[in-house]
Every structure is written in structure tokens, then in C-alpha cells.
Image (cartoon, rainbow, N blue to C red):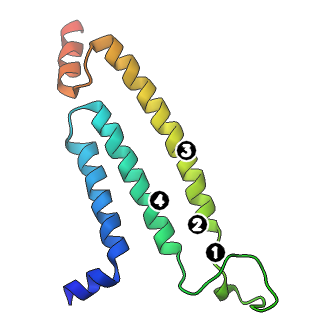
Amino acid sequence: MTADFLVGHYPFALISTLLAIGLYGMTLKRNLLKKVIGMTIFQTSIYLLFIQGATQQGATIPVRSAELGTDAALYINPLPQVIVLTAIVVGVAITGVALSLLLVVFRRYGTLDEDEILRQMRQTA
């Protein structure tokens, strides 16, 4: 039963694995660069989950054709792809800002280790 379920839903199993890897990187790693990489993996898994949930077996592109008529069930909904495209642009911007902040932090403290940065901040305060 469990193996059949996983075979039938393997994209969701792979997406869940990516989600767990990203969450692990964001929460348990001490290096700030690894946290940003974990955040990027987490974002990508969310994009994939959204796209996978929007797939429709046997549907075609959302361009009206005379053969298919106007039945909306025969066409793929383009809205999830548009939303994911917007989320990708926002994700790239967030990653760019995060990496630039990491550069500033590294120049100031000489490390990207979270514990070491906090120790140095306590000494200067």
C-alpha cells in the first residue's frame, strides 16, 4: 500500500525531500551562506509543489481551438505558472539582497559563522 502510494505520487515525495533539505539548511546550519542556500532550495521546492499541484492530465495549452471548444476543463490554467514566475523573480531579488548582506557581514566580522558573529557582537557592545 505505501509503496504503491509513493510510486503514484513520486513528484510529491521528491518535492517533500527538497522541502526538508531546505528547511534543514535554514534552521540547523550555522554558516549564513548555507542558510541562504537552504532558503533557495526551500523556495524552489515550493515552486515545484505549486506547479505540480496545477498539472492536469490530458489538458492542453490555454489557447482556444475549434476542436476542443470552450470547455475549461480541457485547458491548463495558466495562473499558477504566472504566480510561480512572479515568485521566482521575487526569490532571485531576495537571494541577491541576502548575498549582498552576507558580503557586508563578512567584511565586518571576517566570518559567516553565526555563533562567531554573535560572540564578536557581544564583545563590542
Discs 2, 1 touching: Cβ within 8 Å? yes
Disc number for residue 47: 4
Badge number at residue 77: 1
| Residue type marked 3 | Val
**What separation in Å lies between label 1 and label 4 (alpha carbons)?**
16 Å
Instruction: Check if mark 3's residue and mark 1's residue have beta carbons within 8 Å.
Output: no
Q: Would you identify the image quadrant in which residue 115 lies?
A: top left
> Going from the N terminus, do you reach mark 3 or mark 4 first?
4
Residue found at x 78% / y 92%: 67
Contact flag, marks 1 and 4 (Cβ < 8 Å): no
The crowding category of the residue bearing disc 4, from other C-alpha atoms within 10 Å (few below 14, some 14 to 19, many at least 20), is many
Q: Which residue is mark 2?
A: 80
Could you tell me the amino acid type at mark 4?
Answer: Tyr
The quadrant of the rendering that contains the N terminus is: bottom left
Q: Is residue 107 left or right of residue 55?
A: left
Disc 2 to disc 4, C-alpha distance: 9 Å
Identify residue type, mark 1: Asn
